Image (cartoon, coloured by chain):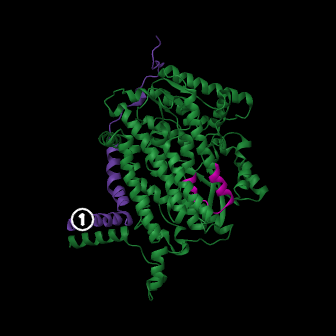
């Protein structure tokens, strides 16, 4: 039991240290800047979109119809 | 040979990304172990921090995040970075209607909308920029303000995504049928009488306003889209971005109606027209007069608000509930009361634990958005910190050389300029114009009083009161300078704001007459391409060097590149 708790503690300590390394060396920022954002920009740039200029400009119906 | 070359490229890239060059005077000589230990525990003194050396090229990324001393670095890591990342995940689940549903809707929204997918994952860098150089209580207090804004942002976009027809195959869900979309400067307090039955969600707060601060790349797409269909480039870029969202079909469809306003001035009338066209659903336009002090105009504003309520009653079949209005108005009054306490500390002591950017953004956000539980939570945290700094007389920004008031519309892409200005020049931006709007308690003793106060509240919206609301409001700068004991003005100069341009000369004359140190900071609101962040820094630095004859506290912050940063 003691060994098991120490093992868990050890694993948590390693995770904590890894997270600190991510934080201290700004690895989250670097990942988003160099990898994630360019990927997302490419996706949005190539996305097919509705042409809202084709929306008719009419009178609008009320949401609730009068009885 | 190829492998050697590749290894060299990798080595150089790693150096660029992670290695901080030591300054010349530290490269040789014996190491002072006591100083190293002291710096490790307490953090380097302000003048030795060399924060500019930490940046990676012009990206705004850090070779490594600041070492703020052991205690503050551990606080930042645990209670700001880890805490906020963890709470972002829990907020997505909480506000998304459950862990699975929340994550699924969030993922759909992330992949569908540029303002979501390109912007919001960079949020911790938004914290970093605003909190650079902060230590002790001001680090803690300011971070809580950021936390409040993040939580409320998540709540809003999760509400949008849960009901968005575009993410759910065109289906009009029950949630969709109970939402009201509105312009971001229609104050949330307008909807208090319907609060528990209908959900009011500002359309542009998350899709436009917050994105400019978190990642200023996103909004440029919307401004360009607006101009691509032949609309002129000279109106306020805020209006351009807001209708550019529609041109690019990047707005979520989460409500059957829309309430618009002339936010904050008549420049946005075109925005309302285009929103009316593209949204293609019942829309109520509630423009507020620019000059509103006249009692007859006030009566007109009150009638406009009542017409808005009638519109909501008619469209949703939900009657205005007076008790509900009183409940939320009284809750909001508590937020206003605490804001006054904060201003009292900021004006009269050096113990205010909120820095310029956190003060400005939090205030503009919650006062526009209206009463929400998160604001009270955040205020409780900040109250605790502020009580401690006042009781123990903790000077929160000890390198303050000048107390600054910032006036007019701020550059959204560089809201953290005041953090830089403190770190580089000791300029403490104590208060700003946007913080001072919506300064109105809402009486609930009678319906007539409530309507009167609500009308005033609505008129004191961002920019409307003090940028375009008539000279008597615009020139209230002098009174606030005295009240907050400021010796310097940073005068924002939004180059596309016709309202403020008209009174530019009056300000010049008054600054001269009153012998006030005023630095004009030109900008184009959300558009960083017109006046870059670097140019803003140069303007301020030039003034500090040539007029004030001062030396920078941190010379590495005088001249650096950040054109590609968020």
The C terminus of chain B sits in image quarter: bottom left
Residue B418 at what x, y percent from top left? 57, 59
* Residue B263 sits in quarter: top right
Q: Is residue B565 visible?
A: no
What stretch of residues is rendered in magenta?
Answer: B340-359
Residue A10 seen from this side? yes
- Is residue B565 placed above or below B373 in the rendered structure? below
SS label for mark 1: helix
Looking at this view, name the residue that lies furthest to the bottom: B30
Marks counted in the figure total: 1
- How far across and how far down the image is residue B18, in percent? 37, 69
Residue B248 located within the stretch drawn in magenta: no
In percent of width and height, residue A67 lies at: 46, 10
Front one among B180 and B496: B180
Magenta stretch: helix, strand or loop mostly: helix
From the top left corner, tell me how far across and down residue B558 is, in percent.
55, 68
**Chain (purple):** A
Q: Which residue is mark 1?
A: A5
The chain ID associated with circle 1 is A
Outermost residue on the front side: it is A1
Q: For the point 66% across and 64% down, which residue is it?
A: B402
Q: What is the quadrant of residue B500 in the picture?
A: top right
B82 up-or-down from B19: above or below: above
Q: Residue at left 66%, top 45%?
A: B501
Quarter of the figure that contains the N terminus of chain B: bottom left
User: In the depicted view, which residue is nearer to us: B508 or B92?
Assistant: B92
Q: Residues within 10 Å of mark 1 (few under 14, many from 20)?
A: few
Q: Which chain is green?
A: B
Residue ID at (71%, 50%)? B477
């Amino acid at each position: 039991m003691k060994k098991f708790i120490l093992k868990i503690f050890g694993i948590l300590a390693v995770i904590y240290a890894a997270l600190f390394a991510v934080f201290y060396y700004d690895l989250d920022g670097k990942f988003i800047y160099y990898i994630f954002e360019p990927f997302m920009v490419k996706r949005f740039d190539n996305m097919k979109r509705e042409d809202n200029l084709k929306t008719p400009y009419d009178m609008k119906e009320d949401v609730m119809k009068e009885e | 040979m190829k492998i050697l070359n590749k290894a060299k490229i990798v080595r150089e890239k790693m150096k660029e990304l992670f290695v901080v060059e030591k300054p010349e005077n530290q490269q040789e000589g014996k190491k002072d172990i006591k100083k190293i230990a002291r710096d490790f525990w307490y953090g380097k003194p302000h003048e030795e921090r060399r924060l500019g050396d930490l940046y990676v090229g012009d990206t705004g990324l850090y070779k490594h995040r600041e070492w703020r001393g052991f205690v503050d670095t551990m606080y930042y890591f645990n209670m700001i970075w880890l805490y906020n990342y963890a709470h972002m995940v829990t907020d997505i689940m909480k506000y998304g209607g459950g862990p699975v549903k929340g994550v699924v809707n969030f993922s759909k929204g992330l992949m569908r909308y540029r303002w979501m997918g390109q912007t919001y994952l960079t949020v911790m860098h938004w914290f970093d920029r605003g909190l650079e150089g902060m230590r002790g209580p001001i680090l803690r207090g300011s971070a809580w303000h950021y936390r409040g804004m993040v939580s409320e942002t998540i709540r809003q976009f999760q509400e949008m995504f849960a009901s968005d027809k575009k993410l759910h195959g065109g289906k009009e869900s029950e949630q969709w049928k109970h939402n009201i979309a509105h312009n971001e400067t229609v104050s949330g307090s307008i909807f208090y009488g319907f609060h528990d039955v209908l959900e009011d969600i500002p359309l542009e707060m998350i899709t436009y306003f917050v994105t400019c601060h978190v990642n200023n790349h996103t909004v440029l797409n919307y401004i360009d889209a607006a101009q691509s269909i032949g609309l002129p480039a000279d109106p306020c870029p805020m209006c351009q971005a807001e209708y550019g969202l529609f041109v690019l079909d990047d707005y979520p469809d989460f409500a059957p109606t829309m309430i618009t306003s002339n936010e904050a001035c008549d420049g946005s009338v075109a925005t309302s027209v285009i929103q009316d066209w593209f949204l293609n659903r019942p829309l109520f336009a509630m423009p507020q007069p620019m000059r509103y002090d006249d009692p007859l105009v006030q009566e007109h504003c009150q009638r406009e608000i009542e017409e808005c309520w009638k519109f909501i009653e008619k469209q949703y079949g939900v009657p205005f509930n007076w008790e509900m209005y009183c409940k939320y108005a009284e809750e909001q009054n508590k937020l206003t009361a605490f804001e006054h306490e904060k201003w009292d500390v900021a004006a009269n002591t050096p113990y205010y634990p909120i820095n310029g950017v956190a003060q400005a953004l939090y205030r503009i956000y919650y006062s526009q958005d209206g009463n929400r539980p998160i604001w009270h939570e955040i205020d409780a945290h900040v109250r605790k910190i502020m009580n401690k700094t006042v009781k123990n007389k903790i000077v929160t920004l000890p390198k303050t050389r000048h107390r600054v008031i910032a006036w007019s519309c701020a550059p959204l892409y560089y809201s953290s300029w005041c953090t830089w200005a403190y770190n580089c020049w000791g300029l403490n931006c104590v208060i700003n114009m946007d913080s001072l709007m919506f300064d109105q308690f809402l009486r609930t003793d009678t319906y007539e009083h409530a309507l009167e106060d609500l009308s005033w509240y609505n008129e004191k919206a961002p920019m409307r009161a003090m940028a375009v609301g008539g000279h008597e409001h615009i020139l209230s700068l002098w009174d606030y300078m005295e009240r907050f004991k400021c010796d310097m003005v940073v005068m924002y100069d939004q180059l596309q704001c016709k309202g403020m341009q008209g009174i530019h000369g009056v300000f010049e004359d008054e600054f001269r007459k009153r012998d006030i140190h005023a630095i004009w900071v030109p900008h184009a609101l959300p558009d960083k391409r017109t006046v870059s962040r670097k140019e803003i820094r140069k303007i301020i630095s030039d003034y500090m060097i040539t007029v004030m004859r001062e030396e920078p506290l941190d010379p590495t912050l005088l001249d650096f590149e950040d054109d590609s940063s968020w």
